[in-house]
Amino acid sequence: MATSFSIRNSDAAGISVLALEGFLDAHTAPQFEEAIQKEVAAGRRNIAVDCAQLTYISSAGLGVFMSFIEEIRDAGGDIKICAVIPKVLQVFEILGFQSLFDIVADVPAAQAKFAAGPREG
Amino acid sequence: MRPRSVAILMTAAVGFAAFAYLYRPAMSQPAGFQRADRKTAESAAYQTVRSLLGTEPAPGTFVPKEEYNHSLRVWQHAHAKQSIDTMTSPLETRLKFRDSARHDIEVSLSSSGRVTRIRAERKGRNKPAATDRGELAQRAFRLLAGEFAAQFQEKEPAGNGLTRRWRATTSHSSLAWQIEVRFDAGGFVEAVLRPQFSDAFREEAARVTRGHGTAAQVISGVVYFAGSFIIGTVFAVAKLRKMVDSGSVRTAALLFFVSGLIAVWASSRTVSSFIGVTSSAMGFLFAFGAGLVHGRETEWARWSGARLFLQRRWLAKGTAEPIACGLLWSGAFAAIPLAVAQCGVFGTALLDQRDWSTDILRGMPALAILHPFFDPASLFLFVGLLPLLSARIGIRWISLLLFFPAAAGMHFLNSRFVAGLEAGIAAAAITAALSIVIYELHGALGVLVAGKGAAILFYCATLLLSGSAALQTAGYVVLGGTSILAGGAAYFARRGKEVEAEDVMASRFLSRRERLKAEFSVAQQAQQQLLPASPPELPGFRIAAACQPARDVGGDLYDYFQLADGRTGLCVADVSGKGMPAALYMTLTKGLLCAAAPAEKQLLRLAGHVNLHLRNACRRKMFVTAAFAAVDAETREVEYVRAGHNPAVLYEAASGKARLLHSRGLGLGLAGDAVFSRGTDAVCFSLSTGDVFVLYSDGVTEAMNRDKEQFGEERLLDCVERSAQSGAQAILEDVRDSVAAFSGTEPVHDDITLLVLSTE
C-alpha cells in the first residue's frame, strides 16, 4: 500500500509543533517516532502534534504516542494533540485517548494548555 | 528394466565402443616402432658409452625405469608423415650404471632402441680432458641424430661455449627436434635428443624443458589457485559456514588432503602437480559451496547427489545412481574429441585430455582419478551461471540454450589442441552439449563423475597401449578398480537406501524465506489451536465465532471464559501491529485472560487485571484493544466492557434495529490501573429473544474495496439487521461473506474476527 506521510517541524513560543500529514500507519510510524525522539533528545519536552492534515492513523501510529508519553511526562513535559479531523478523532476516542491525552482544537489551544501548567492525572 | 535404464545402457555401450574403436588407431604404435627389450637396451647403452666416453661400463648396476611422453604420442598421431617426424617413440627406458672411470651414467632409450639421452656424473677427479670438447660434441651429435644427421643444423653456440645445439625442423612446424650437448669446466655432462613443440604445444614444450617448465607450472598453479580461491571466496565463503554442515566440510577437507598426499606420492618430481591438485580440490570445495548457495532454488534437485556424497551417504541410491550413470556416460564423453579428430573435414586434431604432465608415470592414473576432468571453473558455470540464468529467465530450455556457449567456451579453454581451431570448437561444443544432457539427467555429481570417468579411460587406454609391461599393469589395475566401482555403484543405484539429502539437514539448506515460511506455518497452527474449538453450551443462546488472519499469524483473538460467579465470558481482542510480534502478544493476552477469569466476579476488574499485566509486560508501543461481555444465561443480563475496542453491535428484535454500543473505555496496556479504571466503564443491558450481540475486530469495518472505501459500521449494522433472524452461525457467515464480497480482489490487510451471540 503506497502511503504518503510527512512531518513538518516548527516552533511556536517554546513549544515544538510536529505537523503530521497523510497516513500514519505501520510503514510511516518509524518516521514519527524518529521525529519525537529528536525533540526529546534536544530537550524539548513540550510537544504539540498538529493533526489537521492527518487523514489516517493505525494502531502502530497510536503506539508512537504511547511509547514516549511516560518519558516526556516524567521529565515535566507533555504531548498535546491538536486539530484532529473527526475520522481520526473517532479512532483516538475508541481507544480512550481522551483519558490519556489533552486533545485540543488547535495549536494556540495547545499553547494555552501548556501555559496552564501540568496535566492532572 | 525401465526404458530409461535401457537407454542409458545402450548409450553407454555405444560410447565405450566408439572410444575403443577410435582410440586404438589413434594411439597404437606406428609401424617400425618396437619396444626395445632389456638385453637390446643394455647392449645399446654399453655401446654408446663405450664409443662416446671410451670407458667400460661396470655390469650389474642397471636400474631400468620407464616413462611415457604422452604429448609426443599425441603429436605423432596427428602428424607422423615422414620418418624424421617420428625419430623416437614416446616410451622411454632409462638405465643407470657406473663405468670404469667411476662416472655415474644414465642412458635413456626410446622404445625403437634409439639413444635419446646420455648423462654423466663424475664421482672422482678422472675426467675426460677439456680439449676433447669439440670432437666429443660431434661424436655425441652423430650418435643421437643417426641417419637424420644431415637434416640437423648447428645453431650458434651458447654464450659460454659449453653448450652446443643442433636443430632439425620436421615437415610440420609444430615439432622440431633438438640435440643439445653440454659440458662444464670439468668436461662432458649431457647429450640429449628432445622434441621441441611449438604453437599450441608451447606449454608442453616449456614443461619438457626442465626448470623453466616447473616455474611455469608453479606460476600457473598459483594463478589457478588464486583464481579458484577468489571466485570461491566471493561466491561461497561468506555463506559457507551457514550453508554447509560441518560434516560436509570435513569430508571435502579430507578428500582434498588425501588427494594432495597421493599427488605428492604419484608425482614427486615437481611440487606443481601438488599445487594443481590442491587448487582443483579447493576449487571443487568452493564450487560446491557456491552450488549450495546459488543452486538452492532452481538447481536444488540436481545437486542432491553431490550433497549426499559430501554427507558420506555413499551407499545411498541418490549417490550411487549418478556415480554409476556418470561412469556409463564416460565412454561417450571420451570418444567425442577422438571422433572429431577422425573427422577429415576439420583436419587432424586431437584434444589432449588435460593431463598436466608430459610424462605418464606409473602413479599417473591415481592422479587421473583425483583430477577433475571438469575443472572447477566448469562447475562454477553449472552452479553459478545456470541457476542465475534460470532464475532470471524462468523457462528452463531457454536458459540452457543461453548457458551452452559459456559451457562450450569453458571446455574450449580447458582443452589443449594439437592443431585445428575448428576441430577444437566442434569438440568443445559437443562436449558442452553432452555435459548439459548429463547434468539434466544425473545432476552435478553425474557430470563430475562422467568427466572423471573419461579422464580415467584416456589414461588407462594410454597405459594399456604403451608397450611397457609395468605401465600396462597399472592400466589394468585402474581399469579394474574403476569397473568394480561402477559395478558397486550400479548395485547400490538399484538396491541402495532411499535417502533424501533434505532429511539430514533440511533446515540448514532451506533459504531464509523458506525457513521463515515453515516457522510461520508452525506458529499459525499453534495460534489456531489457541482459539477455542467450539463455543460453550449456553442454554437459550447460540454462539458462533471465527478468526481469519490476514497473514500467516494474526494479532486477533476471541475467547470464552468462566467468571467466578458462573457467568460466561466472551471476548474479542486485537493486538496493535501485525505479524509475529502481534501474535506473541495475542498469546500473552489469552494467557492472562485464562489465568485471571476464574478468580474474578467483575468484568471491569478482569479487564483491569489484564491491563495491568500487559502494561507491565509490554513495550509502551504495544497495546491491546478488547471487548468483553459476561452473560448470565438465567437472567439474560449482559455486562459489557469496551477496552479501547470497536464498539459492539447490539440488535434488538423489538425495534428491528442494530446499533453500536459506545461506552468509555481505554485500550489495554496503555495506562496504569488508576487511569484505566477511571477511563473505562462497564455497561449492563439485558437481551430479549431474537436479540443479537456482535463483537468484531476492526478488520471487519476497515476492510477496503478497490476504491479505497471502507466497509464501515453502517454496512455491518445493515448486515446484522438483515440476517438477525437466522441465528448466530448464519449471521457470522453473512457478515463474513459481505466483507469478502465488498473487498473483492483487494488484498486483506487486517485480521477479520467475529463473535456472534444470538438469543433463542
Image (cartoon, coloured by chain):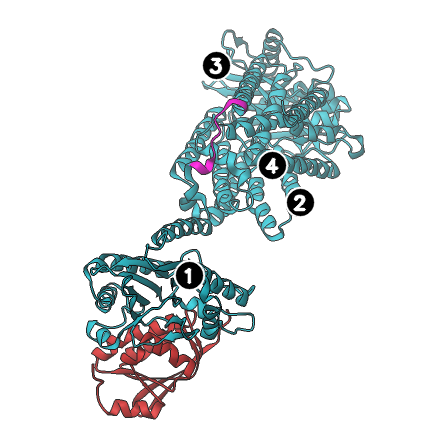
Residue B618 against residue B326 in the figure, above or below: below
- Closer to the N terminus: mark 2 or mark 1? 2
Which chain is cyan in the rendering? B
Magenta stretch, residue numbers: B494-503
Secondary structure category for the residue under label 4: helix
Which chain is red in the rendering? A
Looking at the image, can residue A44 be seen?
no
What's the amino acid at mark 1?
Ala
Residue picked out by circle 2: B397
Residue picked out by circle 1: B728
**In this image, B302 relative to B345: left or right?**
left
What's the amino acid at mark 3?
Arg
- Closer to the N terminus: mark 3 or mark 2? 3
Residue B439 numbered mark, or none: 4
Q: Is residue B567 magenta?
A: no
**Closer to us: B373 or B158:** B373
Examine the image and state in which quarter residue A113 appears: bottom left
**In this image, B79 relative to B547: left or right?**
right
Q: Residues within 10 Å of mark 3 (few under 14, many from 20)?
A: many
**Closer to us: A28 or A9:** A28
Q: Residues within 10 Å of mark 1 (few under 14, many from 20)?
A: many
Task: Give the CA separation, mark 4 to mark 3.
Answer: 61 Å
What's the amino acid at mark 4?
Tyr
Residue picked out by circle 3: B102
